[in-house]
Amino acid sequence: MCTYSEGHTALGQVVSFATHPDDVERVKEMLQAVRTIDLPVTGRVNVSHGGYGRYTRYQITQHKYGGGGSGYIEVLEIADPPDGRCGVVLHCYSMYEGSDFFEFDGVENAKLAWKICWGSSDKYKKIKEQKGCLRDVCC
């Protein structure tokens, strides 16, 4: 359960946030101890997803993309992954199965998995069986 609200920092900056309904007032109080809030921006890249895109602070190259009415599948190479995490992922979204990303040991293996699995109805299972797949992370 989530409630959307707004609060003000000590300098009056308006901040939107989402939290449990019982915590709204506590978050507003906490914001009073903060002077300003800024989102980190270190090289904004727009990663295209068919008809729309999403900005990210990471340096991402989209190698493959396939999508339709109920989801998409893409191969992403992240040049500067956070906390030493894997930099090659095959990301899947399905309105029926949700969103997962699969870490791969290299771009070529991820592209091959994309080619084999993108049109498959059981791609979430098939991707895990592909050469170079390191792990599945449910989002």
Image: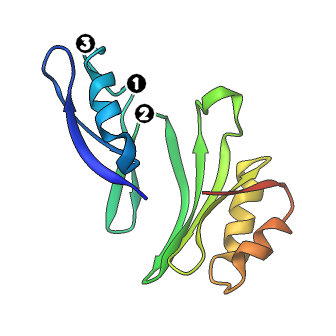
Numbered mark located on residue 42 in the image: 1
Q: Position of residue 48 (x, y in %)?
A: 39, 57
Near-viewer residue (9 or 128): 9
Residue at figure coordinates x 34%, y 28% from the top left:
39
Numbered mark located on residue 93 in the image: none
Secondary element at image label 2: loop
Q: Residues within 10 Å of mark 2 (few under 14, many from 20)?
A: some
* Distance (Cα) linking label 1 and label 3: 21 Å
* Residue 7 against residue 118 in the figure, above or below: above
* Distance (Cα) linking label 2 and label 1: 5 Å
* Residue 95 against residue 93 in the figure, above or below: below
Q: Position of residue 134 (x, y in %)?
A: 83, 51
3 vs 2, front mark: 3
In the displayed structure image, the side of residue 22 where residue 80 appears, left or right: right
* Residue 115 against residue 53 in the figure, above or below: below
Residue at figure coordinates x 66%, y 52% from the top left:
89
Residue at figure coordinates x 68%, y 72% from the top left:
115
**Of pointers 1 and 3, the one earlier in the residue sequence:** 3
Numbered mark located on residue 57 in the image: 2
Give the residue type that dot 2 points to. Arg
Secondary element at image label 1: loop
Q: Position of residue 73 (x, y in %)?
A: 57, 68
Task: Specify the quadrant that holds the C terminus.
Answer: bottom right
Assess whether mark 3 and mark 1 are in contact (beta carbons under 8 angstroms).
no
1 vs 3, front mark: 3
Residue at figure coordinates x 63%, y 76% from the top left:
118
Give the residue type that dot 1 points to. Thr
In the displayed structure image, the side of residue 29 where residue 100 appears, left or right: right
